[in-house]
Image: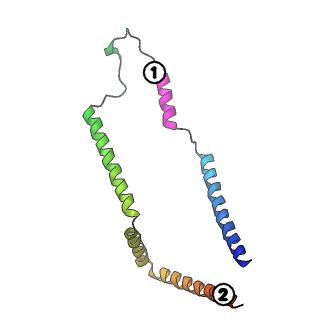
Amino acid sequence: MAGFMGLAIIGLIAGGIGCAFIAEAIKCFSHESVAPEKTLETLKDLKEIKPTTAREPEAARTPTEPKRSSDEIHANVVATEQMMGETVQEIGRRLTPHYANQQFRRKFQEHPYRWNLIAIGTGFVSALWVKRRMNHARA
């Protein structure tokens, strides 16, 4: 019965935390618009542009933005691919156990007393838990 109660309490705590996260997400969504703003602006711009007739001379049209050359477009694509590659490499580096170990050591060196107190507290709680389990096993 005690095992069931322990699992039920842990389940209720996890469920409560999940509900809190969901409530926070719903609150954020209610304050922000999920409409694609850039797409809506583009559609409005396209509606405002009058269609050109076949009789209108080419020189009379004024482009809103100068056309980029294929070399400029290619350079942009290469730069974006390079930036994405660097980002993927950085994410891969941060997901390694070596990086996690470095971060833990850095945090430990910043606050050694705090981490030592956490370790002592964890050891004490674990010892009490083991002692209790052993007493229940004897009974």
Query: Disc 2 on helix, strand or loop?
Result: helix
- Residue 107 drawn at (x, y percent): 43, 74
Looking at the rendered structure, the kind of residue marked 1 is Ile
What is the magenta range?
36-49
Query: Disc 1 on helix, strand or loop?
Result: loop
- Residue 116 drawn at (x, y percent): 48, 83
Overall secondary structure of the magenta section? helix
Q: How far apart are marks 1 and 2 (CA)?
A: 78 Å
**Quarter that holds the C terminus:** bottom right
| Colouring rule applied to residues | rainbow
Q: Residue 132, labelled with which disc?
A: 2
Of labels 1 and 2, earlier in sequence is 1
**Quarter that holds the N terminus:** bottom right
Q: Which residue is drawn at 39% across and 66% down?
A: 96
Q: Which residue is drawn at 43% across and 77% down?
A: 108
Task: Give whichever of 1, 32 is nearer the camera.
Answer: 1
Q: Residue 69, labelled with which disc?
A: none
Q: Residue 49, labelled with which disc?
A: 1
- Residue 47 drawn at (x, y percent): 50, 23
Q: Does the magenta stretch include residue 33?
A: no
> Looking at this rendering, what residue extends furthest in the left direction?
71
Q: Residue at x 52, y 32 (%)?
A: 40
Residue neighbourhood size for the residue with mark 2, other residues' Cα within 10 Å, grouped as few (<14), some (14–19), many (≥20): few
Q: In this view, does 63 lie above or below 110?
A: above
> Looking at this rendering, what residue extends furthest in the top direction?
55
